[in-house]
Image (cartoon, rainbow, N blue to C red):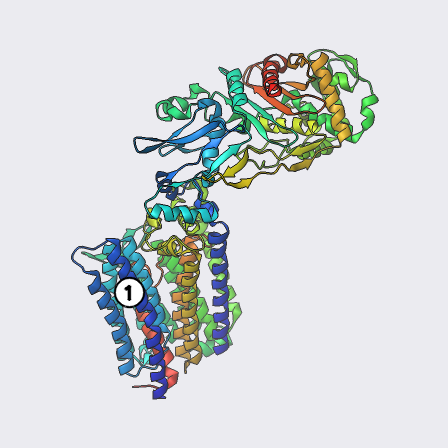
């Protein structure tokens, strides 16, 4: 069994060559482009990042972690691509993102070494629930509104999006709660079983609607329904949840003018191409201008889109790497999803299945709705592209999720401390 | 639970497949169209580093070219306001219109593989050059039409009915694209009469009696015996208690005389006999209620979807809710001239590379078989009679047989709009002209001389 683990890690080592090559190519671009951040040498950034990813690999190897060998390289490829494009858009942001990447990797190392027995985490579902709701409440009360959504906490120089943590806490809570109450749920009803579940979810969605962070509300709901399906196997529940959500959405559509504007923009952004539809029209034009082969790194002009480094970075990638690039990014997330689900299938106990399944849906569905949002497949909801968009909270939480997925995938291989 | 995970994985796969297919659609299928959208700020950068192609008329006369002026590229329009409704303008401040906008991709060399080549040139710091357009337009006729309209609001369209090639597309008042900066504030002054509006393509007018060509087609198709009949015009026709009037009581007349004197009573009677469905379907064959595929944006001409007896009587004489562009009425006339076959109108004949190589060439192609040759022939004969001794005598040319139809379209703002459509020589028409002059009264008086001058000049060549 121990040898199986080291086989994994050897393959991980081979796979880590690819993100390393992307980083080196990105460094080549930085060095030749003349774009520089004062006070930082690109070479130091490159060495720091390579050391970070290879160091993490080394830690996993030394601690004989049996986790899935694809997860770290996939995240590293996405992060490396994200950093390259961030540098091209805004060198100062890219350097901050490097720091966030290092913090994310530290969290990953901490989770994969310190909390390898993830079942221990799940003995306190109500702790996670209360913590999650507390984060949400505090955001509503003292949060800052940035770009329409009141989803930021500002502490002096420091800003964070608590909602990123809330999503993970919610999955942790549901994994514990659902595995505990699974039998009762499968058999049928009873207010005692359904009450807390529905109340918690409704509250979360309500708070998000108040914050106007519809993207996060949508992600939470989809994750909740997916986990409910995993726990009960009943499509009825999912249909019921979907139906309830549709009703709620309809009600919100009538109540909130900003939602009506969003939908109108989605249906025809060209009607107000210089105003409300500007972002999405310019995003479509950027994707179209990239065409099949792309303009080449740094040669696109997606900077005309506001907050391009956060919500719209996928558009820059689509313009500069073309259709091949944008499909490539989508397929990387699909691969990540498939490895996550594989960890869920292989998990030894119900908590593991629910945790891995929930976290996988959380990450990949978020990636899907922002990729679909900026390309007008779905209405635009402002969320980050995991591992890629600029944003500390998002990046650190993404690596936290990666660490948990690594732990779940390691458990069937019998390596327990 | 493990089966549920597998199913969830399959759903995820399906969702991502949809995304991949959709991205393929956006980037590969609609990519070039999005790139060439006027809202694309990338085009402004390309514009700075590219020498825009030249636009030529049918004989190689220059309508628009780029000249270097102290290291700066400047667009020059030798025909000024005359060609402006067709060529448009391009400006970093005011955007672009006309062919400068609709053929941006050709003029800047941004189509297909050429874009990569030119982007490579720009990256290397060299100046790329776009492609040239060769139009079917006749610059001399275009200038003549603009001069004939000068001081009035209106439009002239002339085309070759056998090929669909557009020879004249004039609109008045117009503006000088060479002096856009100086004239901009005046151009947008309501008192200027909307010089930026291309009345030939974007002006929707009631067509008045010119619509009788459509009504005649419907009637003759329905019942060829109409030709042998006598009609009686007491000066009015009562339809559901509403009186449709003629300028005077024409008395007894046959089909040809009804056309010659433009008898409202006879044509309304014919339309009522043929029925609303026949009238509407004939109008649809002529191109009403359909988007026009053309090199420049064209407004859609309209016949109301629901016609009661009143509406039908009104529509049959081009009043009520019927609206048509001058191009539309030129196409109607061209279909009559071309034995019932309407040709696809076109303005760009060829696109050539900077090296003179032809990259694209338009082919004349039939757009719609509107009616049989016999019906078209009868209508044309009636139009010949109209020039010989009817309302359109002012369109007659010495030595050439001309066929024409007048129209005076009532409208809420003052005098009737004067219409005239004509073709010459009638035996084998080489040119079709449609003229509209706003609020100028009778078509036979205000519009006919303009059409006559254009035809005379065209046939002299």
Res A180 visible: no
Horizontal and vertical percent position of residue A126: 33, 72
Residue position marked by numbered label 1 in the rendering:
A24
In-image side of A395 versus A248 (left or right): left
- Quadrant assignment for the N terminus of chain A: bottom left
Location of residue A16 with respect to B167 vertically, above or below: below
Q: Relative to A90, does residue A98 appear above or below in the rendering? A: below
**Within the image, what quadrant is residue B90 found in?**
top left
Could you say where residue B399 lies in the image, as x and y percent from the top left?
68, 14
Q: Can you tell which quarter of the image residue B93 is in?
A: top left
In this rendered view, identify the residue nearer to me: B37 or A201.
B37
Q: Is residue B352 left or right of residue A138?
A: right
Percent of width and height locating residue B106: 47, 40
Q: Quadrant of the C terminus of chain A?
A: bottom left
Mark 1 surroundings within 10 Å by alpha-carbon count, few (fewer than 14), some (14 through 19), many (20 or more): some
User: Could you say where residue A334 lies in the image, as x and y percent from the top left?
Assistant: 43, 67
Query: Does residue A197 lie above or below B252 as drawn?
Result: below
Residue depicted at 46% across the width and 41% down the height = B105
- All told, the count of numbered labels is 1
Could you say whether the residue bearing mark 1 is in a helix, strand or loop? helix
Q: Residue furthest left?
A: A39
Residue positioned 31% across, 57% down in the render: A85
Chain at tag 1:
A
């Amino acid at each position: 069994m121990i040898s199986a683990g080291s086989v994994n890690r050897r393959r991980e080592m081979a796979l880590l060559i690819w993100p390393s090559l992307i980083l080196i190519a990105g460094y080549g671009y930085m060095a030749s482009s003349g774009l520089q951040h004062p006070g930082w040498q690109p070479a130091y950034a490159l060495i720091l990042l390579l050391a970070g990813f290879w160091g993490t690999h080394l830690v996993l190897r030394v601690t004989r972690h049996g986790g899935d060998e694809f997860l770290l390289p996939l995240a590293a490829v996405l992060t490396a691509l994200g950093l390259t494009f961030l540098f091209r858009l805004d060198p100062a942001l890219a350097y901050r993102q490097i720091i966030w990447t290092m913090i994310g990797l530290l969290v990953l190392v901490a989770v994969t070494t310190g909390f390898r027995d993830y079942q221990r985490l799940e003995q306190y579902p109500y702790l996670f629930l209360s913590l999650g709701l507390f984060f949400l409440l505090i955001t509503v009360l003292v949060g800052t509104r940035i770009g329409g959504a009141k989803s930021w906490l500002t502490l002096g120089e420091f800003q964070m999006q608590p909602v990123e943590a809330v999503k993970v806490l919610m999955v942790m809570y549901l994994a514990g709660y659902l595995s505990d109450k699974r039998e009762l749920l499968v058999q049928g009803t009873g207010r005692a079983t359904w009450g807390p579940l529905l109340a918690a979810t409704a509250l979360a969605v309500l708070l998000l609607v108040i914050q106007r962070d519809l993207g996060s509300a949508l992600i939470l709901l989809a994750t909740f329904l997916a986990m409910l399906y995993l726990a009960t196997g009943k499509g009825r529940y999912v249909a019921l949840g979907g139906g309830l959500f549709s009703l709620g959405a309809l009600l919100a559509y009538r109540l909130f003018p900003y939602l009506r504007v969003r939908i109108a923009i989605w249906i025809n952004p060209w009607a107000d191409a210089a105003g409300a539809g500007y972002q999405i029209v310019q995003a479509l034009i950027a994707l179209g201008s990239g065409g099949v082969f792309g303009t080449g790194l740094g040669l696109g002009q997606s900077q005309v889109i506001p907050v391009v480094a956060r919500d719209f970075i996928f558009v820059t990638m689509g313009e500069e790497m073309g259709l091949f690039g944008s499909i490539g990014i989508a397929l990387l997330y699909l691969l990540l999803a498939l490895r996550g689900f594989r960890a869920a299938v292989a998990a030894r106990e119900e908590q593991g299945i629910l945790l891995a399944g929930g976290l996988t849906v959380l990450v990949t569905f978020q990636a899907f709705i922002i990729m679909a949002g900026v390309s007008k497949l779905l209405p635009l909801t402002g969320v980050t592209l995991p591992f890629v968009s600029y944003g500390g909270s998002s990046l650190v939480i993404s690596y936290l999720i990666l660490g948990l997925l690594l732990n779940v995938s390691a458990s069937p291989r019998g390596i327990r401390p | 639970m493990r089966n549920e995970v597998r199913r969830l994985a399959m759903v995820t796969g399906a969702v991502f497949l949809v995304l991949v297919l959709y991205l393929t659609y956006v980037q590969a299928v609609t990519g070039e169209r999005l790139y060439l959208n006027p809202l694309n700020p990338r085009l402004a950068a390309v514009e700075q580093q590219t020498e825009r192609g030249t636009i030529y008329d049918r004989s190689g006369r220059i309508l628009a070219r780029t000249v270097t002026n102290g290291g700066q590229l400047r667009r020059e329009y030798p025909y000024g306001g005359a060609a402006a409704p067709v060529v448009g303008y391009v400006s970093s401040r005011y955007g672009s219109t006309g062919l400068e906008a609709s053929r941006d991709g050709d003029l800047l060399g941004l189509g297909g593989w050429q874009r990569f080549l030119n982007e490579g040139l720009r990256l290397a710091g060299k100046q790329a050059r776009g492609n040239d357009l060769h139009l079917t337009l006749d610059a001399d006729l275009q200038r003549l039409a603009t001069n004939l309209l000068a001081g009035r609001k209106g439009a002239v369209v002339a085309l070759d009915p056998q090929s669909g090639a557009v020879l004249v597309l004039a609109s008045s008042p117009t503006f000088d694209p060479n002096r856009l900066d100086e004239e901009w504030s005046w151009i947008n002054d309501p008192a200027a009469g909307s010089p930026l509006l291309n009345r030939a393509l974007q002006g929707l007018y009631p067509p008045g009696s010119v619509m009788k060509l459509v009504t005649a087609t419907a009637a003759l198709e329905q019942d060829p015996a109409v030709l042998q009949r006598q009609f009686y015009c007491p000066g009015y026709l009562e339809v559901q208690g509403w009186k449709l009037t003629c300028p005077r009581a024409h008395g007894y007349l046959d089909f040809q005389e009804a056309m010659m004197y433009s008898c409202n009573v006879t044509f309304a009677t014919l339309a009522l006999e043929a029925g609303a469905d026949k009238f509407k379907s004939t109008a649809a064959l002529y191109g009403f209620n359909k988007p026009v595929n053309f090199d420049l944006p064209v407004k859609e001409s309209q016949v109301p979807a629901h016609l009661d007896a009143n509406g039908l009587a009104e529509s049959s004489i081009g009043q009520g809710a019927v609206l048509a562009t001058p191009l539309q009425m030129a196409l109607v006339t061209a279909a009559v001239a071309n034995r019932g076959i309407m040709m696809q109108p076109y303005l760009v004949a060829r696109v050539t590379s900077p090296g003179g190589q032809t990259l694209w060439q338009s082919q004349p192609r039939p757009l719609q078989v509107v009616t049989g040759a016999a019906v078209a022939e009868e209508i044309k004969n009636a139009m010949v009679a109209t020039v010989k001794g009817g309302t359109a005598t002012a369109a007659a040319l010495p030595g050439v047989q001309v066929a024409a139809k007048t129209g005076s379209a009532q409208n809420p703002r003052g005098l009737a709009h004067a219409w005239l459509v004509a073709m010459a020589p009638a035996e084998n028409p080489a040119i079709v002209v449609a003229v509209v002059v706003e609020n100028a009264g009778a078509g036979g008086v205000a519009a006919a001389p303009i059409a006559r001058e254009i035809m005379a000049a065209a046939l002299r060549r």
